[in-house]
Image (spheres, helix red, strand yellow):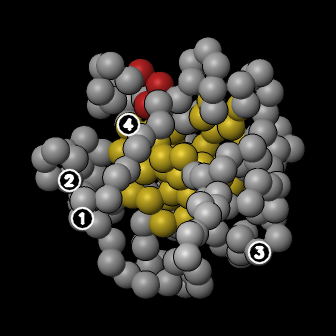
Amino acid sequence: MSLVPTPGQTVGPFFGYALPYDGDSELVPPTRPDAIRLHGRVYDGAGDPVPDALIELWQAAPDGAVPRAPGSLHRDGYTFTGWGRAATDRTGHYQFSTLRPGGGVAPFAQPFFAITVFARGLLDRLFTRAYLPGTAPAQWPSLAARADDRGFVFDIRLQGEGETVFLAYTAP
């Protein structure tokens, strides 16, 4: 029997149907004293906003440890799980309420947000990182977040001028 390869996912947009949930983008309540905001816009190759993308965020805790607490899909208002999901609005904007990530152990010593992008026209998700200001690898300036008054801004450009660097993960 010969098996035929299939795509990684059906081309959307369909993310709004079952993936968003209450509190999905609030890794911590925005009123928490040490809460920060990570936000930005997703742009397509023509520089237009992508109004139907879904962004997933994975990150270390402020002490650099990888959170192991369950509860990402049922937020309790105080447990930090290090994972969240945010849909873009009609202007391509997304935002998370989270904590500042700490640095880990080499080679991951620099603090960063791990980001996964799902969007129309993609046959599979894209992986990237948003490094805190001044910590991005010099050869990848598109991975540098900018500071703002409440946290950090990280715009994602799917292709074209200023395209965000996307990472490939392979099985060991």
Classify 10 Å Cα crowding around label 2: few (below 14), some (14-19), many (20 and above).
some
Depth check: give the residue in front, 115 or 61. 115
Nearer to us of marks 3 and 4 is: 3
> Considering the numbered disc 4 on the image, is that residue within a helix, a strand or a loop?
loop
Nearer to us of marks 2 and 3 is: 3
Position of 104 relative to 19 (above/below): above
Marks 2/3: CA distance? Answer: 33 Å
Classify 10 Å Cα crowding around label 4: few (below 14), some (14-19), many (20 and above).
many
For marks 3 and 1 on the same chain, the one whose residue lies earlier in the sequence = 3
- Which residue is disc 2 drawn over? 104
Locate residue 106, reporting x and y percent: 13, 47
Q: Amino acid at mark 1?
A: Ala
Residue lying at the far right in this picture: please name it. 90
Locate residue 132, reporting x and y percent: 38, 37
For marks 2 and 1 on the same chain, the one whose residue lies earlier in the sequence = 1
Residue 65, numbered label: 1
- Which residue is disc 3 drawn over? 18
Locate residue 67, reporting x and y percent: 33, 71
Marks 2/1: CA distance? Answer: 7 Å
